[in-house]
């Protein structure tokens, strides 16, 4: 059940799977989750919804008063065959909405 969990929508495909962790950073300034919901920042385990969206393990809190609650999702994907670990960063299209 994803009710009242923080729902994240990315502007690009995220390539994450359920159970992986991400670091969230909000950059919207005054009236955004950067100011209103500092508990959203940092490391969170996700549940994949689709190629662009996921929910976090944290409860949804205050609604932002800005039009677009922007920020970044940061994570590392590992390829054990090639021993390759690129650090990936995706911009958030819209965040901080309850599902």
Image (cartoon, grey):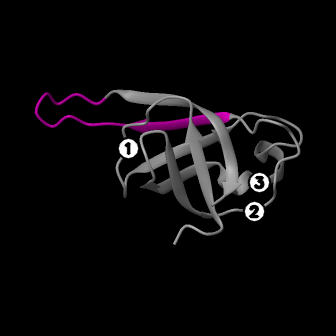
Density class for disc 3 (Cα within 10 Å; few <14, some 14-19, many ≥20) is some
- Seen in the image, is 27 located left or right of residue 14? right
Q: Residue at x 10, y 33 (%)?
A: 81
Q: Residue furthest left?
A: 81
User: Which of the pair 25/52 is nearer the observer?
Assistant: 52
Marks 3 and 2: CB-CB under 8 Å?
Answer: yes
Which residue is label 2 attached to?
Answer: 61
Q: Which mark is residue 76?
A: none
Q: CA distance from mark 2 to mark 1?
A: 24 Å
* Residue 30 coordinates in the image, percent (x, y): 89, 38
The disc, 2 or 1, on the residue closer to the chain's N-terminal end is 1
Q: CA distance from mark 3 to mark 2?
A: 7 Å
User: Which of the pair 34/13 is nearer the observer?
Assistant: 13
Which corner quadrant of the image does residue 9 belong to?
top right
Which residue is label 1 attached to?
Answer: 16
The disc, 3 or 2, on the residue closer to the chain's N-terminal end is 3
Asked whether 39 falls inside the magenta stretch, the response is no
Which residue is label 3 attached to?
Answer: 37
């Amino acid at each position: 059940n994803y009710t009242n969990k923080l729902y994240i929508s990315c502007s690009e495909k995220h390539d994450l799977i359920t159970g992986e962790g991400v670091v969230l950073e909000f950059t919207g300034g005054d009236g955004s989750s950067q100011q209103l919901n500092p508990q959203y920042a940092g490391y969170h385990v996700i549940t994949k919804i689709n190629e662009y969206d996921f929910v976090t393990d944290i409860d949804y809190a205050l609604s932002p008063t800005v039009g677009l609650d922007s920020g970044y999702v940061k994570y590392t994907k590992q390829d054990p065959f090639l021993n390759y670990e690129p650090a990936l960063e995706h911009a958030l299209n819209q965040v901080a909405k309850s599902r």
